[in-house]
Image (cartoon, grey):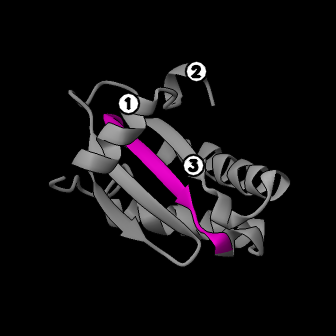
Amino acid sequence: MRREQRLRASDDFSRVRREGRSWALPVLVLYAAPRGSDDEPTRVGVSAGRRVGGAVVRNKARRRVKEAVRVAYADIATGWDLVFIVRPRAAEADYGEIAAAVQTLLGRAGALVSSSRCNA
């Protein structure tokens, strides 16, 4: 993902978790918060804690989530800040399961272009 499509600052991650709504699956958790206006690009961040596994396992899980989001990015509505939290079950999940979880969570959040915006 390009630089303007990524959440990078710790304050941004904290704001999304504090002000946004959340949806969870056994593999991932999604926090979503609307940005200031709808014409701003959607930004995405991925986090994996130590409970997921060692550094190699965490990074592999994060890379898979980032790739699933990159593939789905064209279908995501503008004006969102999204934070995906990787759960320990993602370490054993294959890419297809992670990609399906990303799509499901984005749909539940109303962050897809075809779905309506939620009141977060």
The stretch of residues the image draws in magenta is 78-88
Establish if 41 lies above or below 65.
Answer: above
Q: Position of residue 38 (x, y in %)?
A: 25, 31
Q: Between marks 2 and 3, how big is the CA–CA gap?
A: 17 Å
Residue occupying image coordinates x 43% and y 59%: 30
In terms of sequence position, does the residue under pointer 1 or pointer 2 come before the other?
2
The verdict on residue 82 being magenta is yes
Question: Mark 1 highlights which residue?
Answer: 11
* Furthest residue toward top: 3
- Which of the labelled discs sits on residue 92, or is there none? none
Q: Position of residue 49 (x, y in %)?
A: 61, 56
Q: Between marks 1 and 3, how big is the CA–CA gap?
A: 14 Å
As shown in the figure, which amino acid type bears the numbered disc 3?
A: Ser
Question: Mark 3 highlights which residue?
Answer: 47
Establish if 112 lies above or below 39.
Answer: below
Establish if 82 lies above or below 114.
Answer: above
The verdict on residue 100 being magenta is no
Q: Between marks 1 and 2, how big is the CA–CA gap?
A: 17 Å
